[in-house]
Amino acid sequence: MYRYDEFDTTFVRQRVDQFRDQVNRRVSGELTEEQFRPLRLMNGLYLQLHAYMLRVAVPYGTLNAAQMRKLAFIADKYDKGYGHFTTRQNIQYNWPKLPDVPDILDHLADVEMHAIQTSGNCIRNVTADQWSGAAADEVEDPRPYAELMRQWSSLHPEFSFLPRKFKIAVTGAQADRAAIAYHDIGLRLKKNGSDEIGFEVLVGGGMGRTPMIAARIRDWLPKQELLAYLEAIMRVYNLHGRRDNKYKARIKILVHELGAEEFTSQVEEEYTRIDAPRVMPPAQELERIAAYFAPPAFDDLQDDSPKFMQHEEEDAAFAQWVERNVAAHKQRGYAIVNVSLKPVGGVPGDASSDQMRAVADLAEQLSLDEIRVTHEQNLVLPHVRKQDLYRLWQELKKHELADANIGLATDIIACPGLDYCALATARSIPISQDISNRLGDIARQREIGDLKIKISGCINACGHHHAGHIGILGLEKRGQEYYQITLGGSGDERASVGEIIGPGFSSETVTDAVETIVDTYVGLRQNGETFIEAYRRVGPDPFKEAVYAAH
Amino acid sequence: MPLIKNGQIADDTWQVLEDDAPLPEQGDVIVALERFLAEIDQIRTRSGRTGIAIENTVDPQEVTAHLDDLDLIALDFPAFTDGRAYSQARQLRTKQGYTGELRATGNVLADQAGFLLQVGFDAFEVAADQSLDVWNKAANSMALAYQRGYGGTQKTRDKLQAARPLANTSNCALAVEQSLPI
């Protein structure tokens, strides 16, 4: 993992002092709320329905045990004993008090964390494949570049007042677990014809009211040119992105209105004007960062652990958990463990301070002190010896963290919705809980198989409903919440936008509709095809017929 | 509107010329870009200095050929959240090599002082309610910057590294106090 040097430490501390001064000026009345608003948003502080909300950056979703314990401490001291992990791999606290926020930031700085640019019209926390550095299918670990971008984007003098927020995601694998095609910029490390590794560059993806899949503007960019090329993209966007209408201000609209070809040529032209060596980090700086992400001290193990295999044979519940929650590791004898934050009927992404401390302890004992946050609102212990899996599973069970439902129907993404959010038009969490309870029987979930249900409480789509195999969008009409259903969305390497199937449903009937869709799929699937495979084969009609005939 | 240069309130010798006002022979005047381009021949015969105000939708390349005729370029912030002029300033200072006064006008907020200096502005028309103290505090609140190749007083890591080796501060929360003289 990356560790701060004196430069990073000083930078973050000075940013805290700067923000403390801004908070003091707001509290004293020297700053109006209008003036304070963009300043607090630059530091992740929102004013929500009931209170301020502080969003803390988890850069590219990577944490160590000390950091997770600090998050638990903050949850206890400044919040109500829990935190909410988000679809951008961050954590949100829903109940901090404004004068406490600078102190919270100081506590975060103690463990090399911050809330810089977790909101505002700037470059947001860079997200990455949660299995980076562990995944068996990775070309190269993308985290050194994510860290490079974290640094480069922090208080960027030119790109801190963009037309709209800006999100970058990066992966080093063929399988896309970071939803890069749904980001303003998506980056994928890949090899060119000469076996050199560089970046495929996608621009203009996004959710919101105008969902779009990103266009590829460079098939292969030499790795060392990354920051200079990003500068070109950002400058074209900063100068030409629309500012007349905030709903049309994201870069996806600029790419769409210009056309991908014209946009690309503007970026390439700007790129020729940039004095790249002046902007790019020196080679030794890239090496300095990369050294922190060298593989940890893995034990030299046999691939198979007889102990593990015996437990898998003897304990069916353990075997089911392994099947759903454990993934292949690049290191022999190790495995990646996904820790579900989706108990049946629970709030997606919420973790109590006790759970955070338990995960911290287990990371220290069994995962080489590493934890990841996923954009699907779960946690990952990335480096677990197979021989330790059974023990880990037993420990996780004690803290209600062993649900064997990764990728199943109850592994639902949901935004905070009207229970917290000032922008929401409908509740998300209760709908998620209702569906989770309805489909929660583990045998039934396993029978249904891979299924991504994603719920947003407004058109801004923080719950990624466009990318849901089943997407649910909560809206409001004449004081009544209602829910639109989309089918066929996907956020992976075959990214697609879900299509609306017809009129919406009330909060009382939407779960029935989801169940009908699921049952329809189970009835029509062939040869073990998954929900999304079946949908791609048959299209929306059988589902529409079933849903609207029944209701 | 007070004018700030080099961290101090400065006399403003420049007069913004209305489009229909006659072009004076003497004195420092700021004209709109269109007028500047239309009357470039007369402007060149003036004894006073000339500057232009350009809107934030204009591509700075439009004035590339005239940079030698210009002593001031004023870039506009219609709202402090509208950041286009940062990129215009950056383009003028880097690729185009403009070295005259670059003035920020419009809705300029003290808290943006650091960024404005970094992209190359060196004069600022600020609202009367923005005190010089707040401005200077904001301008100097960050001693460090991650971005290479920008201006301002902030030190980048490689510059700091060249001056002296940086300590690894893992598990050392007191590093700020130890590193104040940067």
Image (spheres, rainbow, N blue to C red):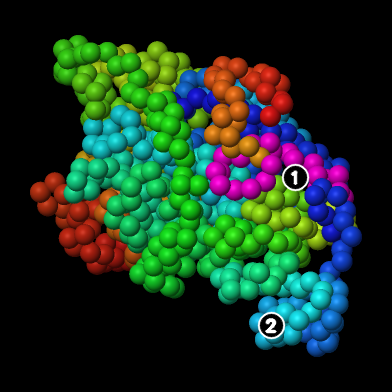
Q: Is residue A339 above or below residue A195?
A: above
Looking at the image, which is closer to me, A546 or B59? B59
Give the class, few, some or many, for how many residues have Cα within 10 Å of label 2's Cα (few <14, many ≥20).
Answer: few
Badge 2 amino acid? Ile
**Which residue sits at x=72%, y=79%?**
B44
**Residue at 29% of width from left, 65% of height from top?**
A544
B174 is higher (above) or lower (below) than B151: above
The quadrant of the rendering that contains the N terminus of chain A is top left
Residue B40 - label: 2
Which is nearer the N-term, disc 2 or disc 1? 2
User: Local crowd at mark 1 within 10 Å, few (<14), some, or many (≥20)?
Assistant: many
Start-end of magenta stretch: B131-153
Q: Image check: A496 left or right of A76? A: left
Q: Main secondary structure of the magenta part?
A: loop
Give the mark toward the camera: 2 or 1: 2
Spatial distance from mark 2 to mark 1, Cα to Cα? Answer: 36 Å
Q: Amino acid type of disc 1?
A: Ala
The quarter of the displayed image where residue B57 is located:
bottom right
Q: Which residue position is annotated with label 1?
A: B139
